Amino acid sequence: MKKLASSLLALVLLGGCAAQRPVLYPNQHLTAVGPFAADRDIAECQDRAATTVRSTRAADTARDTAIGSGVGAASGAVGGAIFGHPGAGAAAGAVGAATAALLNGALRAGTPSPAYQGYVGACLGERGYQVAGWQ
């Protein structure tokens, strides 16, 4: 059972790390330049965005983990006190909530921040492309 849980966790974490890319609307410019030039332009705009826009995903995950751990400890202590073990309840609640927050952060890791998406979209727009979404 432990092996199955570890395998599922690894798959979730790897899936969360897949970086999203903009999807281009097939306008006249995209048709004229073709997919290879479009891929090059996407890569250049993403590189510019990566050096200009600071991502806060890691800081968000750390903050959410700390908050979740505190809330989990408090609620676990209350639940543990009902059954006569507030310390054990607090520890279990803190670990459970921290784990949930870390997994949530890992799943969001592949999603670019709104500022990053906006920067890439503006860069591509200046080059004649239209971003239809992110995938």
Image (spheres, rainbow, N blue to C red):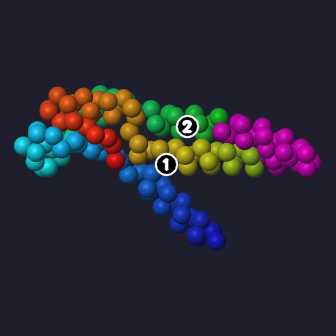
Residue at point 82%, 49% (across, down): 88
Residue 135 seen by the camera: yes
Please tell me whether residue 61 belongs to the stretch shown in magenta.
no
Disc 1 on helix, strand or loop? helix
Q: CA distance from mark 2 to mark 1?
A: 14 Å
Q: Is residue 67 left or right of residue 23?
A: right
Residue toward you, 116 or 26: 26
Q: Which mark is residue 107?
A: 1
Q: Looking at the picture, does residue 115 appear above or below residue 21?
A: above
Residue at point 69%, 48% (across, down): 95
**Span shown in magenta:** 68-91
Q: Position of residue 55 (x, y in %)?
A: 40, 33
**Residue type beneath disc 2:** Ala
Disc 1: CA contacts within 10 A as few (<14), some (14-19) or many (>=20): some
Q: Nearer the viewer, mark 2 or mark 1?
A: 1
Q: Position of residue 73 (x, y in %)?
A: 75, 41
Number of dots carrying numbers:
2
Residue located beneath label 2 in the image: 62
Residue at point 27%, 44% (across, down): 23
Q: Is residue 59 left or right of residue 18?
A: right
Q: Position of residue 72 (x, y in %)?
A: 72, 41
**Residue type beneath disc 1:** Leu
